[in-house]
Image (tube, rainbow, N blue to C red):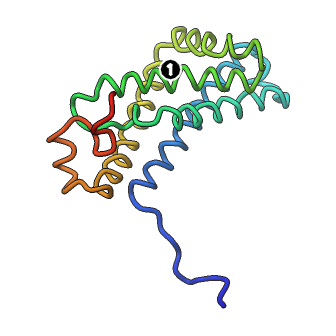
């Protein structure tokens, strides 16, 4: 029996897009966590960061990935009528990611102040808010590639039929949205 095969399993285009979306969510959330750390302690930018400050950045990245996972079909919905769901998914990822990251970094107070710090950081720097929105749009586009691929696997005739004929994906038909 051969332990190693010469054939490598390659991920499909949708799976690669989903992995890239999760990576982008982790990087952008971790970057926002870094800016929150720098906002709270200016010395962290110029001196060595403490392990707790590093943990806040890691917790922010974990929170962003978990929020994207928990968003489910809110992020990446295909069709023109699902813009509202995409905006709701972006708000969900931002708020729940801050909630999870704050809870991981400081269990009781972080749960309350995590979303508040993210809102203050984004409102205090409009350029950062624009970059955050562009990251959410990129995550939505990547997840829509993944959703479109899943819809074609589970019985749709073609990607064009799924995207244009019905605003609901194949998996969501029959459910109350």
- Which residue sits at x=47%, y=68%? 10
Front residue of 133/157: it is: 157
Q: Secondary structure at mark 1?
A: helix
- Which residue sits at x=43%, y=50%? 17
Q: Mark 1 — residue?
A: 128
In the depicted structure, whether residue 15 falls above or below residue 81 = below
Name the residue at the bottom extreme: 1
Relative to 24, is 89 on the left or the right? left
- Crowd class of label 1 (few under 14; some 14 to 19; many from 20; radius 10 Å): some
Relative to 136, is 63 on the left or the right? right
Q: Position of residue 74 (x, y in %)?
A: 40, 31
Front residue of 65/49: it is: 65
Residue 103's image quarter? top right
Look at the image and tell me in which quarter the N terminus lies: bottom right
Relative to 137, is 62 on the left or the right? right
Q: Position of residue 155 (x, y in %)?
A: 26, 56
């Amino acid at each position: 029996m051969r332990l190693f095969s010469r054939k490598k399993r390659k991920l499909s285009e949708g799976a690669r897009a989903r992995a890239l979306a999760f990576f982008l969510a982790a990087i952008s959330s971790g970057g926002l966590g870094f800016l929150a750390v720098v906002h709270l302690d200016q010395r962290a930018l110029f001196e060595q960061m403490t392990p707790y400050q590093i943990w806040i950045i890691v917790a922010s990245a974990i929170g962003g990935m978990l929020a994207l996972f928990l968003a489910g079909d809110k992020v990446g919905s295909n069709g023109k009528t699902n813009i509202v769901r995409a905006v709701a998914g972006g708000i969900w990822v931002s708020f729940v990611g801050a909630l999870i990251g704050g809870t991981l970094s400081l269990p009781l107070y972080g749960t309350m102040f995590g979303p508040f710090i993210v809102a203050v950081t984004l409102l205090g720097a409009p350029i950062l808010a624009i970059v955050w929105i562009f990251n959410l749009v990129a995550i939505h586009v990547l997840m829509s590639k993944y959703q479109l691929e899943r819809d074609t696997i589970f019985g749709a005739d073609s990607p064009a039929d799924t995207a244009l004929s019905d605003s609901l994906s194949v998996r969501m038909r029959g459910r109350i949205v």
